[in-house]
Amino acid sequence: MIQHVALPSLAGTVAGTVTSFAPINASLLAVYVETNSAGTLTIAAIGGAPATILSLTGGAGTAWYYPRKQACDQGGTVIAGIYDTIPLNNYVTVDINAAGTVAVTLATEN
């Protein structure tokens, strides 16, 4: 079942970071970003080592993005040209390094 998870919005005259309201336990299908900031926007999964999901620079505007990770075989070797959805099993952060507003929605599937 596909779910849309809205992350807390950022708005203001300074840079900032917000974290999802609850842990997200699903596969990430897409990311909807709406921003008027010309700064760098980074969306990351936290827990263990933070893993960047999406990073946009100078990307004021509104768009859907479909981030993927490279697939691996059973031995951990990457498989060239094969990409898969990103599994999430913790909180997700949104970080912007310049003033502006940011709204992010994740499309996920259990």
Image (tube, helix red, strand yellow):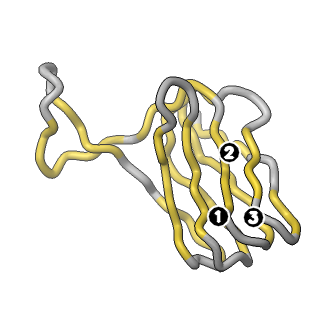
Residues under numbered marks 1 and 3 in contact, where contact means CB atoms less than 8 Å apart: yes
* CA distance for labels 2 and 3: 16 Å
Considering only vertical position in the picture, is 107 above or below 78?
A: below
- Type of amino acid under label 2: His
18 or 7: nearer the eye? 18
Marks 2 and 3 in Cβ contact (< 8 Å)? no
Percent across and percent down for residue 45 are 55, 37
Quadrant holding the N terminus: top right
Q: Residue at coordinates 74% horizontally, 46% vertically from top-left?
A: 7
Q: Say which residue label 2 marks.
A: 4
Q: Residue at x 19, y 46 (%)?
A: 82
| x 51%, y 36%: residue | 50
Q: Image height check: is 72 above or below 14?
A: above
- Which mark, residue 102? 3
Q: Secondary structure at mark 1?
A: strand
**Coordinates of residue 49 in the picture (x, y in percent):** 47, 30
Residue type pointed to by label 3: Val
Q: In this rendering, would 95 be left or right of 72? A: right
Pinpoint residue 34: horizontal percent, then vertical percent: 70, 69
Neighbourhood count class around disc 1 (C-alpha, 10 Å): few under 14, some 14–19, many 20 upward: some
Q: Return the x and y of residue 8 as percentages of the image width and height.
A: 80, 48
Residue 3 shown left or right of residue 84 in the figure: right
Q: Residue furthest top?
A: 74
Mark 3 falls on what kind of element? strand
- Total residue callouts: 3
For marks 1 and 3, the one nearer the N-term is 1
Within-10-Å neighbours for mark 2: few <14, some 14–19, many 20+? some
Q: Which mark is residue 33?
A: 1
Amino acid type, label 1: Val
